[in-house]
Amino acid sequence: MSFSSEWLRLREPVDHRSRDTALLSKAASYLANKDEPVIYDLGAGAGSNLRGTALSLGPRQRWVLVDYDPALLSASLEFLAAWADKSRPTAAGLELEKSGKLIRVEVKRADLNANPAPWDEQKPDLVTSAALFDLVSEQWIDRFCAALAKDKLALYTTLVHDETAKWSPPHEADAQMSEAFERDFGKEKGFGPSAGNQAIGYMTKKLKSLGYETALNDSPWRLGAEDHDLIAQLADGWANAVRETNAVSEDVIQKWLVARKARGTMCVVGHKDLLALPA
């Protein structure tokens, strides 16, 4: 499954302000004794997770951005070069300087469904992701967690969907739309039937059973007037998903869309961040 670079651009500032800062600090502390930690970012998209994480980490870092979509990997290098204070191309990707940090970036195209552990013989010091694990199946989570535990790797993942959006002001079709949206969310997303809003709880229990120390904190999107463009795209995405279920009439969908794309609409989308450290 892939997403447009425009959607990723709109959600980036909201993602960054929504993540739990306490867990980010704990992840940084875990890596503090590494001279140049190696960080694998799964489903990296256009590189937003790096931009939201790197400035909280140490002075030297090596990131490997993993995604199946070559267009997004290419876009990630463009966006990172524009974000950095200085950048220069390397054989594998880029070397960046940003706010006193030296960040080496590589891009790696990989099919995570076929191989949930795309690292090579040099094992990463941290595996990370943003907004990924709600799209995968419980069976894929089992495989991924087993791979993490085998190599005793730490995981820091952010913005995993854990409850349906709450819209305001209320609309008479909200409950009907929410039920249909969550039904669609559980469909195949490229990794088997999606675990959806149950994924983060399932993953946390699985990692605990494998001996991991876990910390799970809330990181909700709180969308207001300044996020109108993102709210409009979110509403369109909901409408398209609901259409796939054939559970709501087009007339109801259209009336709901008009209300949700109107100025003044607000929305809270539940997410959680997870830090899991090996024993």
Image (cartoon, grey):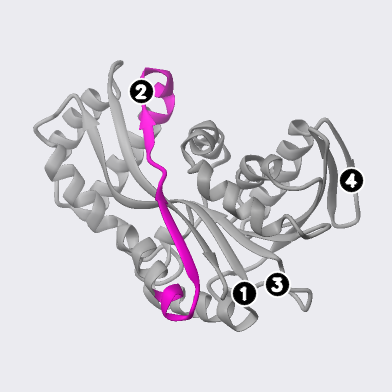
* Residue 273 left/right relative to 247: right
Q: Which mark is residue 224?
A: 2
- Reading the image, the residue beneath label 1 is 117
Q: Report the side of 146 relative to 52 (left or right).
A: left
**For the residues marked 1 and 4, what is the alpha-carbon distance in whole angstroms?**
26 Å
Looking at numbered disc 1 in the image, what kind of residue is underneath it?
Ala
Of the two numbered discs 2 and 1 on the same chain, state the one appearing first in sequence: 1
Instruction: Name the residue at 15% across, 37% down.
Output: 174
The residue pinned by badge 4 equals: 89
User: Are the residues tagged 1 and 3 within 8 Å (C-beta)?
Assistant: yes
Q: Secondary structure at mark 2?
A: loop
Query: Toward the viewer: 220 or 242?
Result: 220
Q: Earlier in the sequence, mark 4 or mark 2?
A: 4
Q: Earlier in the sequence, mark 1 or mark 4?
A: 4
Q: Who comes first in sequence, dot 2 or dot 3?
A: 3
Q: Which residue is mark 3?
A: 119
Measure how far apart labels 2 and 1 are at the Cα level.
Answer: 38 Å
Distance from the alpha carbon under mark 2 to that under mark 3 = 39 Å
Identify the amino acid type marked 2. Answer: Gly
Q: As drawn, is 223 to the left or to the right of 191? A: left
Are the residues tagged 2 and 3 within 8 Å (C-beta)?
no
Return the x and y of residue 47 as percentages of the image width and height: 65, 46
Dot 3 amino acid type: Trp
Q: Amino acid at mark 4?
A: Pro
- How many angstroms separate mark 1 from mark 3 (CA)? 6 Å
Rendered position, 184 above or below 4: below
**Residue bounds of the magenta highlight:** 206-231
At 20% from the left and 45% from the top, the residue drawn is 178
- Image quadrant for the C terminus? bottom right
Q: Can see residue 65?
A: no
Secondary element type, mark 4: strand
